[in-house]
Structures are given as structure tokens and as C-alpha cells.
Image (cartoon, rainbow, N blue to C red):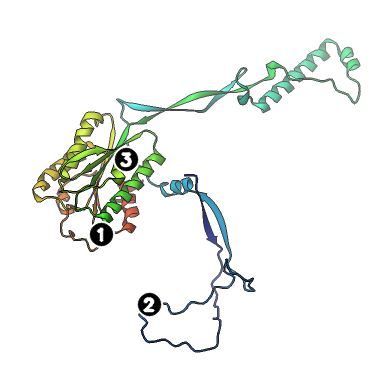
Amino acid sequence: RDKVIKVPIRGIREYKFVYGDNVPGVGQGTGESQNGQVVGKAKQPGKAGEEKAGDQPGSDYYETDVTLEELIDIMFEDLELPDLERKALRQLESFRIAKRKGYRAVGIRVRLDKRRTARERVRRKLATSRVARERDAVQVTAEVTPGTERRFPFHEDDLTYRHMITDVKKESNAVVICIMDTSGSMDTMKKYLARSFFFLLYQFICTKYRNVEIVFIAHHTEASEVSEEEFFHKGESGGTFISSGFSKALEITQARYHPSLWNIYAFHCSDGDNFDSDNPAALRAAKELAEVCNLFGYGEIKPLGSRYYESSMLNIFRRLEADNFQTVLIERKEDIWPSFKAFLARDRGRDQ
């Protein structure tokens, strides 16, 4: 998070025609070149890193320093957990001592309001002078000679401190359940795509929300709750029962995250290669999970040229009629970010 990334920003210039270098000579190939092959590239004048000083102007650009944390904030700016509801029966309290509530005459020195303290001194000085003039104008004139002024120091009564109170903000409970297929059909590329998606999800939650718990579930024919380290690095093998992952999620929600107390978000990534006899059970478990979730997402990992491309759970899950259930297809790494935004876009509900 403490890394700084330099982003070059090129200046905006009007389009214009430029001429080539007009280097004399004739180029001749061997006849073995392919379509689209680059056979020559002109040297860029004024390019950084040249050994000798050049005499040609370079391109105008500026550099700005952006921290990695700022980049993450920019990426997740328009994303949020959709349909986050207030759960009245139980809420977490996050305390932030950052709210002012008036001023007081006592306090610690770091909260001393210097401007108001100086203002109180001026008021006391004016009041003292007015009382003195009314009581004995001759005495005041005798003590204050032209060109001089009697010293009037600060008094403890002048000190004014900012009064800070504890701002108690209640936030509804939320839990995100990450379910990933780790069976033998999930090869290295599929696991890379699935873990990349969940890594984005994990970073998003840690950046945007304070009181959100994360549960990691890995499954093949059997499902188990695992740690973050095991979820992102542990390899598995064996067959695939997708229903085992959904059933484990239901078991955990019933034991620790009751829907009346928690906002529940479940996301599942698999290559869709499920054992045929498990499809009805997977559909039933998915329907039950959708009933207790605010949002239930299924991402199918199908790299282009995949051996099991004909096997897909998307056709099975199309029978699931639930407004809070959403599916995406991820075929290459460029699809990860659009799929992630499709799940968590702030205006997701308006686009559908």
C-alpha cells in the first residue's frame, strides 16, 4: 500500500502532418516476412536514455505520483455492495472521535482554539477598559501615556477549547461468502482466473467496508471452510459436487449469520464441470441460498479452448428464477474486471 506509481500524462497537441526521415537507400527483404510483421522501426528522436545528446524536440508529457491506495480507491469508486439493508435487530457500532460539539472552558492543550482564545482576551480587555474609564477616567489617563500601552496578558478565563464527542455510527452487519471449485478439472489457468476475481473482491471489501466479515469455502466433492491463505494458495483434486459448496454456505449462515441479523453476499466460481447426478441438488441448494442472500453471484470460468467447454452450469442455473441471482462468463483475464463490476456496480439494479 505504500508504493508510489508514476503515471505519465501526455500533453494535448493539435494533429499535424509530419514527414519521414527521408533516409536514402533501398530496403530489400528475403521474402520470408509474414503479414503484420514489423520489418523496421524509425528511431524516436530525443528518447530518454540515449548515450549522446540529441538535437530533436521530444514529446511533451508530465508525471504525477499516485499511491497504490489512491489507485485502489479510484478503481472501486463506483462500486458497492448492492441492496445493503439495515438490520434492526443487530448492528455493529464503529466509534470515530471526529465530531465537534461546541466549545468549553476546560480541555487538553492540543484542542485549544487560538482564535477564540484571542477573541476572548480582546473582549475582556475592552470590558476592563470600559469599566476603568467609567470608574476613574483620570487615573486611566495618568497611567497610559501617549505612545505606550499597558501590557494585558492572557488569563485562564480566556482559554477556549474545542469540545469533541464520540461519534457513534451504526453499520449493519454484512458477510461475504466466497465459494470456489478446487476440483481436478480446475487447472492452473482456471484457478488463476477464479482467484484473481476473488482477490479483487477481497481488496474491495477491505477497502470500502469496516464491519464486513469474509468466509472462504473450497469444495470438490466435499466442501470445507478454509483460511484466506489456504483459499488463495491451496490446490486440490478429485471430482465436483457444486451442491457441497452451496450446502456448506447454508450451514454456515444458519449457524453464524442468520438472515434477519446479517446482509449476506455469496459468490461462487467454477468451471461448470459438475457431476451430472449432482445438478438437481446444486439447483435446489442454489435456490435456498438465493432466498437468504441479498446478492448471489455465479461466475463460470471457461478459458477459450477449454477441454470441458461443452459442460456448463449456466444452462442449469437459468432455471433459477430469483432477482438477486446473477451469472457471468469469464473466458480470459480481460473479462475479470467487467464481470466484477457487473456484480457490484452501484447502478446495477437500474441497468437490469
Of the image marks 2 and 1, the number of the one nearer the N terminus: 2
Label 2 sits on residue: 36
Of the image marks 1 and 3, the number of the one nearer the N terminus: 3
Above or below, 42 against 237 in this view is below
Secondary structure type for disc 1? loop
Q: In this rendered view, identify the residue nearer to me: 267 or 262.
A: 267
Q: Which mark is residue 228?
A: 3
Label 1 sits on residue: 303
Of tags 1 and 3, the one toward the viewer is: 3
The count of marks equals 3
Which amino acid type corresponds to the residue marked 2 in the rendered image? Gly
Q: Distance between the residues labelled 1 and 3?
A: 25 Å
Above or below, 101 against 60 in this view is above
Q: Which residue is drawn at 40% across and 47% down?
A: 78
Q: In this rendered view, identify the residue nearer to me: 238 or 171.
A: 238
Question: Residue furthest toward the left?
Answer: 277
Question: Residue furthest toward the top?
Answer: 135
Q: Distance between the residues labelled 2 and 1?
A: 26 Å
